[in-house]
Image: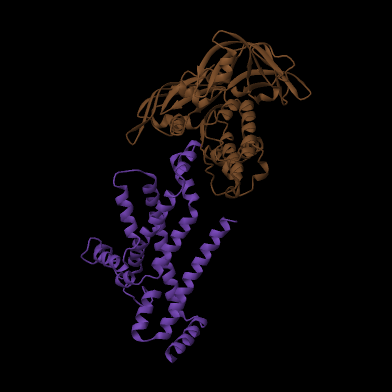
Amino acid sequence: MELIVQGIVKAFQLLISLDPEVLGVTWLSLKISGTATFISLFFGVSVGTVVALNNFPGKRLVISIINTGMGLPPVVVGLFVTIMIWRSGPFGFLEILYTPYAMIIAQAIIATPIVMGISLASIQNLPPNLRLQILSLGASRMQMVWVLIKESRLPLLAAVMAGFGGVISEVGASIMVGGNIKGYSRVLTTATVMETGKGNFDIAIALGIILLLLAFLVNLLLTHVQQRQHPR
Amino acid sequence: MNTILSVENLMVHRGGVRVLDIRDLKVQESRVLALIGPNGAGKSTLLLTMAGLLKPEQGKIYYKGRSIETSAERSWMRRSVCVVFQEPLLLSTSVYKNVALGLKFRGMTQSDIRKNVEDALAYFGISSLAKRSAKTLSGGESKRVSLARAFALKPHLILLDEAFNSLDPPTRESLIDDLRHILEETKITAVLALHDREETLRLAQDVTVMSEGRLIQTGATAQIFNQPQSEFVANFVGTETILEGTVQNIRSGLMEVLVSGKTIEATGSAPISQKVFCCIRPENIVVSREAPENSSARNIFEAQIQKIVRQAFFYKLVLDCGFPVVAYLTVSSCEDLGLCEGATVFASFKATAVHVMRREK
């Protein structure tokens, strides 16, 4: 019991004193996961929209694959990315193993199906005649797609939240492809794993609190935007 | 009369089932055509095809004399043809932005957009809603916004799919009146998919009756209602007497309506020289051998029996009073009077039995 109380007290000391190492880890986490989410948003929304709006043979199979991807185990992604960028792997020449770039790639791969699945579902959930109505008002195909994406902005915000929440709290892939190198590829989750292993519960608890706080702040922000767009 | 759009030998299948099979349909410029028929008759599919939103497997569509075949031609057509769906399909933004949507697609300047949107909102009496969020509107208001959104584009042809469905009666009433005025004033050619006879009578000059993807009968509204060519059409439009006339005179709550050179008295009021339909239910017609004396019926006409049709529990008489009138008589009164085809009788009905509906122009 004493261990926990001591840990929490120390954790708050670290937070209040703005410990440079803790801050650095936090900032890097935000940068990596933010970039990964942004990339996944681009691919997820565009592919999700295309799949939702077009009818083609095997569409159900594609949707099933995307939905399976929403629950992609991070360690499997980590393994896959590691093999790909291993020195003798197909992308070995890039020499990005154990760098933040590798972490961004892995996290983007984890987040993309989440964003894709949610945007696909939200576009499909729009009334079926809405597309035809927009076209009949004289829209070009691109204009129509843009209006549909804007119309499903609320579920898309949920997709951003889910994607970001998924990757910032993910540890398996980050540790495999990033290597948890101090000051370079050490993020909140990998640092927590390491400090817990070393028995430094105070730092681990401090990192855990930051992680929770971050998730809360991001969601608060997005919820705020969401509620402002829907004054009801 | 110019044809703005015509359809020839059109075939549309869905899931192996034929949903449209139309040999020939012409939409005349500046007129209102109603497509009527039961659910599943193919009205909506026909509207989508005419709007260039559905590519037919077979058949030709001509719009303003041009054959519409490629997708480029279809998008050219979509710039001046607009369909309004049964459900309002508004975007979750303000009413103003919803109405501005189509104008924005056309790359119009902000000031032109403002002017067109304000005009369209005023037309439908919803200027006060401009800043409201479209998702907070009532059913009737949403419908008006979706109509304003289409009319703001000043299309040359507008296609309305079941425009008055799921509206409560007073809302529906006022929307029909407004729509009629707007169509009259703007002279926009319109095709309306409807399934209500009264809506049809009030709005349309021409009617096409549809069933199972085919056109059963096409013609002027009064003609379809009075001279149905088949039992299906008769059942669908009803067999009541519907007469075209013009209000001639009004005095103390009575209107005198001129119908085929004869004057019918009816209760209610309408402006003089207003064109109207007089509807008389067959059970309200009294038939007698002699001209009734001291009767309270304001309308008494000498008539010739053209046809007697035995129905289940009564006879249906088609009378010619100079205009056609349908009367229902019980079997016993018909036999007591000894009526036969060709006989001369008197048809009388009260002024209150005449239901007067305004029609356009």
Viewed as shown, does residue B176 lie left or right of A108?
Answer: right
Occupied quadrant, residue B337: top right
Q: Nearer the viewer, residue A47 or B258?
A: B258
Q: Is residue A77 above or below residue B140?
A: below
Viewed as shown, does residue A58 lie left or right of B186?
Answer: left
Colour assigned to chain B in the rendering is: brown
Q: Residue A166's spot in the image, x, y percent?
A: 39, 66
Q: Is residue B355 above or below residue B308?
A: below
Q: Residue B125's spot in the image, x, y percent?
A: 67, 38
Report whether residue A55 is seen. Answer: yes
Viewed as shown, does residue B20 lie left or right of A152?
Answer: left
Q: Residue B95's spot in the image, x, y percent?
A: 60, 45
The residue positioned 67% from the left and 41% from the top of the image is: B127
Please state, as top left, top right, bottom left or bottom right, where the C terminus of chain A lies in the image. Answer: bottom right
Q: Nearer the viewer, residue B151 or B244?
A: B244
Chain in purple on the image? A
Occupied quadrant, residue B32: top right
Please state, as top left, top right, bottom left or bottom right, where the N terminus of chain A lies in the image. Answer: bottom left
Q: Is residue A229 above or below residue A5?
A: above
